[in-house]
Image (cartoon, helix red, strand yellow):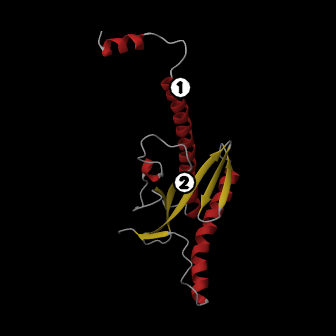
Amino acid sequence: MTKKTAHSKEAAKAPANPSRLEKLAEAAQTYGNRSFHNYSQIRNVAETLRDEFCLFLDEDRICVFLVPPTGPFAAVNAGSAAFSVSGKGFLPLEPISFGLAVAITKFGDYMRLIITCRKEGGKMFISAGKGREHTLNLPIIDIEMGALIEGLYEHLMDYFQDGVDSYDNGDYGNTDIGFDILRMGA
């Protein structure tokens, strides 16, 4: 009897106890389900945040886009490529980052705001920049989203006001807090 035949006969028998491989596959399946659930909830928050922040800034034009958190970006929605887990194969179960390209002028200038989300139980913790964290209950409650949007707006305003204040006071060399500003082609 060849090894292939013996192996096939063994596989045909239904073992009373699952093999280690079966247990590992079951654990990986559970992990994968949780990873997809994590991604889905964060993507829902990201898309809601994009839409609501855009309405908050200007009801008459599209001014916020989902973009990758690092690397080149353009003022277009990047779909699944906007998320830090994009292209990683097996979806990792970890906090996920994405970028929001926010119009800052009427002339095609956009600032990328990097957002990181992590889910813990029924809450979503959302960080924008250094030391700014907001908490949303899941499912999303409008009043909490409003507070988050106000916080993001203040964060962006602070960036510009801090730069102006530092310049006016003669110390403007070290105020960068990590925003990317890009002028899109007209």
Q: Residue 73, labelled with which disc? A: none
Percent from the top left, x then y, of residue 143?
70, 53
From the viewer's side, name the closer residue of 32 and 72: 32
Percent from the top left, x then y, of residue 106?
46, 71
Side of 40 relative to 12 (left or right):
right
Which residue is identified by label 1? 23
**Dot 2 amino acid type:** Asp
User: Where 163 falls versus 46 (above or below)?
Assistant: below
- Mark 1 secondary-structure assignment: helix
Percent from the top left, x then y, of residue 8?
36, 13
**Dot 1 amino acid type:** Lys
Q: Quadrant of residue 73?
A: bottom left
User: Where 34 falls versus 44 (above or below)?
Assistant: above
- Mark 2 secondary-structure assignment: helix
Which residue is identified by label 2? 51
* Numbered label tally: 2
Q: Which residue lies furthest to the left in this view?
A: 2
Label 1 crowd bin: few (<14), some (14–19), many (20+), radius 10 Å = few
From the viewer's side, name the closer residue of 21 and 180: 21
Task: Write the residue at 65% across / 54% down.
Answer: 145
- Figure quadrant of the C terminus: bottom left
- Which badge, 2 or 1, comes first in the chain's sequence? 1
